[in-house]
Amino acid sequence: MNERATGIRDALSGSAEALAKSLAVCAVLAYGLGIVVQNMHLVRLGITDFNAIRIRSIFTGIWCWIVTFCASLPIIILWIQVKVEEKGKQGNPRRLFLKRLGVTVAFTVLSFGMLRLVFGIFGFHEFTSVWTPLLHGDSHLLRLSVGGGSSALLLSIFSYPLRDTKTHIVVGDAQRLRESTPLVIILFLLVAVNELGFLYPLIDSNFGGGRPEQVLLVLTADGKSTWHRLHKDFHDEDDPFPLLLYETDSSLVLRDEVVPCGSKINPVIVLDKRQGSAYVPTPSPSDSCEK
């Protein structure tokens, strides 16, 4: 009995250890992708941030991997299709290729719908509608799904079914698929990371995104002096309401609302946290617009 209990305990201990290692690897992968996507966005603002380990970066990586999985659905389905067909494939190679092509197109359309649904959930808390992203990030979602479909199409071409003239069995396509997959996956991930960088500022910050927030900026005396140099008409008794684009351990990255959109002047202000604090204003019932 003791030996049996010891065996069960050892098995549970081994399973727990394996689960812990798997979770650690997933966290590292999520953090790595999150950091890359965040900095893809920050580079466009003229800054970078690789210094700190934040839970938010892991959340960023989680939704990025989910979006990437949805976009790569045509590639995954192609692999499954080839594996299912691998044994005893008879018939016309062209027909097999056209079948794979049709499945690729179908799952590219499906992945686009899934991307819109996922983006609606993480970006706008919409759990039932795939139409909310239409006016926000649709072009980037479309590029992601087309990137996944194009990658699957390339893999289909590289692994075009060839029939053995003696046995009339399609051979070699699974091996050619394995050989060509790494390069195509690298190209797909490069496209995906670039588009994720554009989606990042559209995602709710609660899910690890970087959507700008209107904040109340409470400045110190030194901060007001700095703000005076940037805005000649600024009054000390006023508190600015800029857009908070990003926050590091030591600074606030703000968008200067005075600079019009499309201007050649960089509207990004990096303010030291010792010069001020940013607060998200919470309206009270008396602030309601309803009469």
Image (cartoon, rainbow, N blue to C red):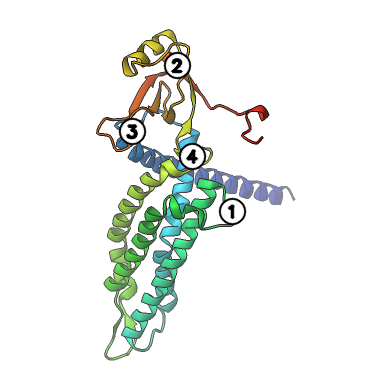
Give the amino acid type for the residue marked by disc 4 in the picture: Gly
Give the amino acid type for the residue marked by disc 2 in the picture: Gly
Q: Work out which residue is located at the far top of the displayed protein and give it.
A: 221
Residue behind mark 2 = 276
Q: Residue at x 72, y 47 (%)?
A: 2
Foreground: disc 4 or disc 3: 3
- Earlier sequence position, callout 4 versus callout 2: 4
Neighbourhood count class around disc 3 (C-alpha, 10 Å): few under 14, some 14–19, many 20 upward:
few
Q: Residue at x 42, y 78 (%)?
A: 85
Residue behind mark 4 = 208
- Earlier sequence position, callout 2 versus callout 1: 1
Q: Residue at x 36, y 75 (%)?
A: 101
- Based on the displayed image, in which of its 4 quarters is residue 212 positioned? top left
x and y percentages locating residue 52 in the rendered image: 41, 28
The image's mark for residue 127 is 1
x and y percentages locating residue 72 in the rendered image: 41, 60
